[in-house]
Amino acid sequence: MGTSTERVRERLHRAERPVVLTGAGISAESGVPTFRGNDGLWRNHRAEELATPEAFRRDPKLVWEFYDWRRRLLSEVRPNRAHYALVRIEEEKRHFSIITQNVDGLHSLAGSRDVVELHGNIWRIRCTGCGREEEDRNVPLKEIPPRCGCGGLLRPGVVWFGEMLPAGAINRAYELVEATDFMLVIGTSGVVQPAASFATMAKQRSAFVAEINPERTPISPFMDEVINGKAGDMLPQIV
């Protein structure tokens, strides 16, 4: 029968429309902090308290100082072996997409082209006035809080707590999940919705679904295969 890794490799080889869902775990292997819990404290503020529309309305300078700090940390982070393994899959498959819950942009930096960013991207900024959005990789930011050419206040291009996911991203994600015949779930907690439901949705549509994670998650029982280990170690073996 072979090992779980061998079985996942064989099913990936046969897949026509593989989709990968990634979470914080794949970025953590590059050294990206999760900004949650005790490790998420910044100037005695919890990250969850600053990543809200209310915090931005109350003190945009403080929120931007937090995001400027995060961007400085991320500017020194590079993709890992797992990110590059996904690039190799894309090179070999006619149809291949990544759905990610991460905002760090590491998939694109590694070379992946078809990436659906459910929670936005920290390297994008959006004007609260005219709505203009663009990439900005200045580290540190030239002005805090930054402003648009129209004079409007700029905000990070990420989804904050209490905000809806971008309609375009979530609709594309659902389309991919409905059409896939192979889904690989990497480094997710299995509890953040709606991404946590993608694996079971794909399985209900007869897709082969596998998970790579150092520990079991709430969605592990629904998987066809579970590979316990780091994505940077296991994914290159599968590819």
Image (cartoon, rainbow, N blue to C red):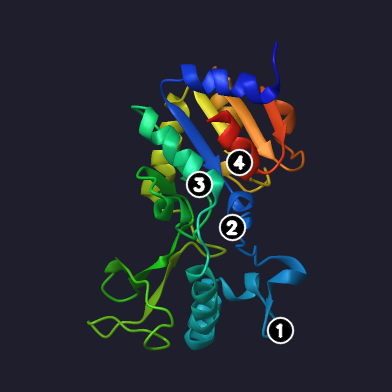
Q: CA distance from mark 2 to mark 4?
A: 14 Å
Label whose residue precedes the other's in the sequence (2 or 1): 2
**Residue on which the image places disc 3:** 83
Mark 2 touches mark 4? (CB < 8 Å): no
Question: Please, what is the three-letter code of the amino acid marked with disc 2?
Answer: Ser
In this view, the residue in front, 217 or 11, is 11
Mark 2 touches mark 1? (CB < 8 Å): no
Q: Residues within 10 Å of mark 1 (few under 14, many from 20)?
A: few
**Circle 4 — which element?**
strand
Give the number of the mark in front: 2 or 4.
2
Give the number of the mark in front: 2 or 1.
2
In this view, the residue in front, 201 or 107, is 107
Question: Please, what is the three-letter code of the amino acid marked with disc 3?
Answer: His
**Residue on which the image places disc 4:** 186
Q: Residues within 10 Å of mark 4 (few under 14, many from 20)?
A: many
37 lies above or below 188: below
When asked about the image quadrant of residue 114, the answer is top left
Question: Please, what is the three-letter code of the amino acid marked with disc 4?
Answer: Ile
**Circle 3 — which element?**
helix
**Circle 1 — which element?**
loop
Q: CA distance from mark 1 to mark 3?
A: 33 Å
**Residue on which the image places disc 2:** 30
**Residue on which the image places disc 1:** 44
Q: Position of residue 26 (x, y in %)?
A: 60, 49
The residue sitting at 38% across, 48% down in the picture is: 111
Q: Position of residue 1 (x, y in %)?
A: 70, 10
The residue sitting at 40% across, 52% down in the picture is: 108
Label whose residue precedes the other's in the sequence (3 or 4): 3
Mark 3 touches mark 2? (CB < 8 Å): yes
Q: CA distance from mark 4 to mark 1?
A: 31 Å
Mark 1 touches mark 3? (CB < 8 Å): no
